[in-house]
Image (tube, rainbow, N blue to C red):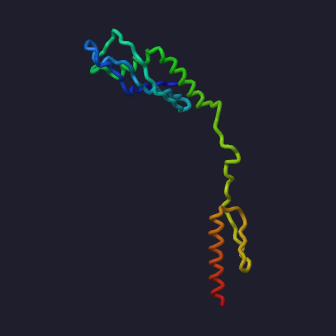
């Protein structure tokens, strides 16, 4: 089931009409469709234009529910609802996905490296990141130097 919310952000008013000061000309809103079953939402900022009507409400007396009802009764609103429902459907059941090419995906790094010391030679086996290998080699050679210097 898809629920729709309308958040009124801004009103543009005509100020030069003395009989109807601040007559609302258009309304900027965020309309959001929310799929309650899949917890997916998609919203769009829209501007709804209105023609002056006989049901003028003084700007200072306007409520959010007045403006929301104008948007809901606007001829474009059902079209917008259908477009948002389609976007939500594509988020739930995508027809296209972006994928990284396989040659750009780094191979997993096995950081388990074994060091074998034979005499004064260090043999590292296993895969490691270069920095780790350099660090391990230098550490082992430092240990070997200390052992050799104390066995004189």
Q: Which residue is at 48% across, 28% downward?
A: 44
Q: Which residue is at 62% across, 64% downward?
A: 131
Q: Quadrant of the C terminus?
A: bottom right
Q: Quadrant of the N terminus?
A: top right
Q: Which residue is at 30% across, 15% downward?
A: 57
For residue 125, which quarter of the picture? Answer: bottom right
Please determine whether, in this image, residue 53 is positioned above or below residue 110.
above
Label tally:
0
Q: Which residue is at 41% across, 25% downward?
A: 28
Q: Nearer the viewer, residue 130 or 40?
A: 130
Q: Nearer the viewer, residue 37 or 111?
A: 111
Q: Nearer the viewer, residue 57 or 24?
A: 24
Q: Nearer the viewer, residue 24 or 115?
A: 24
Residue 123, given in percent of the width and then of the height, sits at 73, 71
Residue 116, given in percent of the width and then of the height, sits at 72, 73
Residue 121 appears in view: yes
For residue 108, which quarter of the picture? Answer: bottom right
Please determine whether, in this image, residue 106 is positioned above or below residue 115.
above
User: In the displayed structure, does residue 71 sit left or right of residue 1?
Assistant: left
User: From this viewpoint, which residue is outermost toward the left?
Assistant: 18
User: In the displayed structure, does residue 131 sit left or right of residue 61?
Assistant: right
Residue 58 appears in view: no
User: In the displayed structure, does residue 46 sit left or right of residue 86?
Assistant: left
Residue 45, given in percent of the width and then of the height, sits at 46, 27
User: From this viewpoint, which residue is outermost toward the bottom?
Assistant: 152
User: In the displayed structure, does residue 11 sit left or right of residue 112?
Assistant: left
User: From this viewpoint, which residue is outermost toward the front?
Assistant: 16
Residue 138, given in percent of the width and then of the height, sits at 63, 73
């Amino acid at each position: 089931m898809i629920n729709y919310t309308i958040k009124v952000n801004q009103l543009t008013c005509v100020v030069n009409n003395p009989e109807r000061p601040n007559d609302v000309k258009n309304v900027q809103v965020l309309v959001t469709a929310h799929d309650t079953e899949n917890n997916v939402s998609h919203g769009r900022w829209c501007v709804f234009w209105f023609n002056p009507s006989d049901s003028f409400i003084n700007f200072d007396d306007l409520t959010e529910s007045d403006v929301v009802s104008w948007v809901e009764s606007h001829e474009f609103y059902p079209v917008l609802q259908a477009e948002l429902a389609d976007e939500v459907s594509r988020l739930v059941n995508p027809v296209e996905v972006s994928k990284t090419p396989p040659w750009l995906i780094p191979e997993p790094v096995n950081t388990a490296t074994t060091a074998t010391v034979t005499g004064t030679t260090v043999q590292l086996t296993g895969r490691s990141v270069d920095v780790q290998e350099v660090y391990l080699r230098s550490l082992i050679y430092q240990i070997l130097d200390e052992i050799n210097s104390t066995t004189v």
